Image (spheres, rainbow, N blue to C red):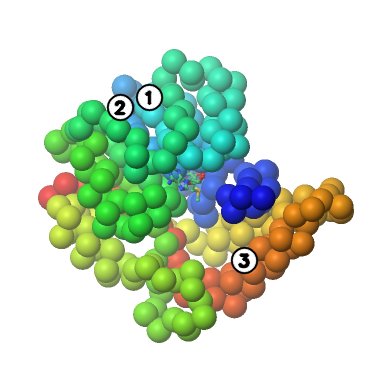
Amino acid sequence: MEWYEFYDLAERDMELINPSSPEKIIEAGKHLGLKKGSRIIDYGCGFAEPLVLWAKHFGISGIGIDFRPYAVERARQKVRDRGLADRIEIVEGKGAEYEVEKHSFDFAVCLGASFIWNGYRPTIQAMRETIKPGGRLLIGEPYLLTKDVPPEYTEAKGVHTETELMQISIEEGFDIGYMIRANDDDWARYEATNWEGLTAWLEENKNHPDRQAVIEWFRKTQDDYFRFGREYLGWAIYILRPV
Ligand SMILES: C[S@@+](CC[C@H](N)C(=O)[O-])C[C@H]1O[C@@H](n2cnc3c(N)ncnc32)[C@H](O)[C@@H]1O
């Protein structure tokens, strides 16, 4: 099993793959300034839930990119089912390798996928090349609640505090114009929906050759959340407006 296939199992009952909610995604769209005809590029689009919500509520069109075949298949099916195939295109591939016409989108989005470029700063640098002058960025990103993190919490490596996110944004030519934070319930729902997907799969696959690997991955991620995640990590959606 490839590493990303663990996520396919965990996310089987999810539509949004981040610790927010449909209401918060719509709220983000409102503050971003989405309107009928806005063109969006969404990097690491997952199951295309944000694009579909924004198409329904604001009349946007756009492109979503994801490298996982499972996510792309589900996203394309959803777009077809909602009658949005003429407005939303789903591309399979690596976000950093996907070539777009420079400065051709109104908004660029990356919700929970800044690892596409290896961090928050390079994500801003890459995405600002895609937006028209005056365009805005929407980035969903984890942040550290404190710098004092135990070294064994390796997931925290490369994660910034919110003060650092603010400073990086300014250095790269943007102000954080709005933010929507994940609360405790959002986090719990997101984590628990992953566990539900994995435990359901384990119940249904008692003799699968990858069963042990799935058990180990599940227990490691759950342990990380209980031991460290709740105490050290936050997540928020930031709206970046050009200075
Ligand atoms: C945490 S999920 C977020 C999905 C979606 N943005 C959402 O909020 O529902 C991150 C997504 O990024 C995708 N991804 C990871 N690496 C990628 C890459 N190099 N290029 C494109 N997509 C990638 C994963 O397959 C996954 O669907």
- The amino acid pointed to by label 3 is Thr
What secondary structure is marked by label 2? loop
Q: Kindly report the distance in space between the C-alpha atoms of the residues bearing marks 3 and 2.
A: 37 Å
**Label 1 belongs to which residue?**
61
Give residue 202's position: percent from left, percent from top.
80, 54
Closer to us: 193 or 95: 95
Closer to us: 68 or 142: 68
**Residue density around tag 3, few if under 14, some if 14–19, many if 20 or more, within 10 Å:** some
**Label 2 belongs to which residue?**
38
Task: Choose top left, top right, bottom left or bottom right for residue 29.
Answer: top left
Label 1–label 2 contact, CB within 8 A: yes
Give residue 31's position: percent from left, percent from top.
32, 43
Disc on the earlier residue, 1 or 2: 2
Q: Closer to us: mark 3 or mark 1?
A: 3
**Label 3 belongs to which residue?**
221
What secondary structure is marked by label 1? strand
> Does residue 135 appear to the left or right of 196 in the view shown?
left
